[in-house]
Amino acid sequence: MNNTKISRRSFLAAAGIAGAAAALTACGSSASSTASSAAGSAAASSEATGGFMELIVFAAASLTETLTAIGEIYSAENPGVTFSFNFDSSGTLKTQIQEGADCDLFISAGQKQMNQLDSTASADVNTEGLDFVDSDSRVDLLENKVVLCVPENGDKGIDSFDSLAEHLKAGDILFCMGNSDVPVGQYTQKILAYYALDEEALAAAGDITYGSNVKEVTTQITEASVDAGVVYCTDAYSAGLTPVDEATKEMCGQVIYPAAVLKAAPNAETAREFLAYLQTDRAATVFESVGFTAL
C-alpha cells in the first residue's frame, strides 16, 4: 500500500503541474466562487472538529502527481485540512476497502472496481452484494486515454498498435501490461482481444510481463526492461514518455474515473466538500495539464 502524505517537494516535483497550479489560483470568477465555497465549508468543518482533520483518499496510481498537487493547494486554502493519500491499483484499493481499511473518498481508474462496492450497481458486477459506496455522492470525474509507449531509443520498430500486434504474433518482443485486476491491464486485455491475440499463450511463451499497477508498467518501459507497454497518457506524460499510438474507443472502450464518498467515511462531510472541489474549473486546470479530461 502506498500511503502518501503530501509535501511541498512532491508538489513541486509533479512534472508540468506547478505551472497549472499557479494558473489555478488565478482562474475566473465563476470557478473561483464555486471553489471558494467548497473551501470555506471545509474550513468550517475543520474548525468544528478542533482545527485539524486528515482526509483519507484512496486513488488510482495514475492520479499520484495531479491529486498530490491539488491536495497541496487545497490544504493551503484550508489550513485545518490535511491529506493521507493511498495510491495503488484500483483493484488493490477496492480489496483494502472491502477488508475494512479507513477511507473517506475513493477514486477508481475504472467503473468495475467502483461498481463492485456499490449496492446500486448490477449484480452481474457487484456479485457479493457489497454496500460501501455512498451512491448519491458518486460522479464520473475524469477521462483518460490508453496509449502505447516504447523505451527511448527502442529498436524494434514498434510505432503503432498494429505493429505491436504483428510483433506479438511473431513472438520477437517482450511486452508489459497491467495485471488482470488492474484497470489498465483490463483495458489492455480488450486491445489484445481486438487483435485476436491469446494473452495466456503469449504469457506462457514469455512474451508478456506484468505490473501490479500502471506505475510499475511505466517504470519497466522507461528502464527499457521491455520493448513496449500500455499505460495511460497521463502516466506517459509524467514519466517523460512520448506515446507512439493511442487506443481507440473500439479497441478498449472509454477510460472513465468514477469517484465517491464511502458510507463509513470517518470524515464524510469534508470528503464531499473536497469531491466538489475536484469538480471545479480550478482543479480541472491541474488535471488537464497532464492529459486528463475533466467531465
Image: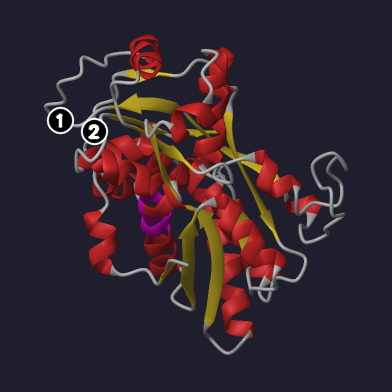
Most common SS among magenta residues:
helix
Q: Position of residue 131 (x, y in %)?
A: 83, 59
Q: Which amino acid, mark 1?
A: Glu
Tell me, yes or no, whether the highlighted magenta stretch contains residue 74: no
Q: Residue at horizontal 39%, vertical 59%?
A: 68
Picture quadrant where residue 282 is located = top left
The span picked out in magenta is 65-70
Q: Position of residue 275 (x, y in %)?
A: 60, 55
Number of the front mark, 2 or 1: 1
- Residue 241, label in figure: 2
- Residue 152, label in figure: 1
Q: Residue furthest bottom?
A: 50
Q: Residue at horizontal 59%, vertical 48%?
A: 108
Q: What kind of element bears circle 1?
A: loop
Residue 260 position (above or below residue 229): below
Q: Residue furthest left?
A: 153
Q: Residue at horizontal 28%, vertical 21%?
A: 172
Q: What kind of element bears circle 2?
A: loop
Tell me, yes or no, whether the highlighted magenta stretch contains residue 66: yes
Q: Position of residue 122 (x, y in %)?
A: 86, 40
Q: Which amino acid, mark 2?
A: Leu
- Residue 131, label in figure: none
Residue 13 position (above or below residue 158): below
